[in-house]
Image (tube, helix red, strand yellow):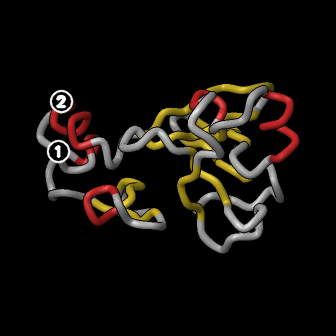
Amino acid sequence: FDDRCLIFGHNGHGQFPERHMWGTNHKELCGWPDKAQLLDNKQAVWKVQHIAGDKYIIRSAFDDRCLIFGHNGHGQFPERHMWGTNHKELCGWPDKAQLLDNKQAVWKVQHIAGDKYIIRSAFDDRCLI
């Protein structure tokens, strides 16, 4: 839409994600002049981890919390969450089965063409926009 990157603003402490570009150059790096600075800032960096089939979890590199629709999947906006201090690789759930059954942190990633994808919540198939 506008090439801005998905971040949690307010230096990574915003409650909900927003689109942002740090400058008008280097759009492929969210406006940062080099990859090292983008990775050091972490706000626009996401860890996408395959779970099963077309299902993934998406974690913020800023604080390692998982992108979810809160309020038991009924939240209006996605937010970051971790269900416990253990098992960060599964958003705090002790095993994949429980993570997949809960669905709040599970995303379906569907390839459309080239570098284009659709990301939908596994909870209710709503698109991440």
Name the residue at 28% across, 65% down. 10
**The N terminus lies in quadrant:** bottom left
**The C terminus lies in quadrant:** bottom right
Above/below status of 16 relative to 104: below
Disc 2 secondary structure class = helix
Say few, some or many: other residues with alpha carbon within 10 Å of mark 2 (under 14 / 14 to 19 / 20 or more). Answer: few
Disc 1 secondary structure class = loop
Report which quarter residue 107 is drawn in.
top right
Percent across and percent down for residue 117 are 60, 43
Foreground residue, 127 or 49?
49
Q: Amino acid at mark 2?
A: Ala
Q: Nearer the viewer, mark 1 or mark 2?
A: 2
Percent across and percent down for residue 21 are 26, 59
Residue that protrudes farthest toward the front in the picture: 85
Name the residue at 18% across, 29% down. 36
Name the residue at 60% across, 69% down. 77
Percent across and percent down for residue 118 are 65, 48
Say few, some or many: other residues with alpha carbon within 10 Å of mark 1 (under 14 / 14 to 19 / 20 or more). Answer: some
Q: Amino acid at mark 1?
A: Trp
Percent across and percent down for residue 92 are 65, 37
**Could you say which disc has been placed on residue 42 in the image?**
none
Foreground residue, 75 or 129?
75
Above/below status of 17 relative to 105: below
Q: Answer left or right for 87 relative to 120.
A: left
Q: Answer left or right for 4 relative to 23.
A: right
Report which quarter residue 35 is drawn in.
top left
Label 1 to label 2: alpha-carbon separation: 9 Å
Q: Are marks 1 and 2 in contact (CB under 8 Å)?
A: no
Q: Answer left or right for 63 relative to 110.
A: left
Q: Which residue is mark 1?
A: 32
Name the residue at 80% across, 47% down. 103
Q: Which residue is mark 2?
A: 36
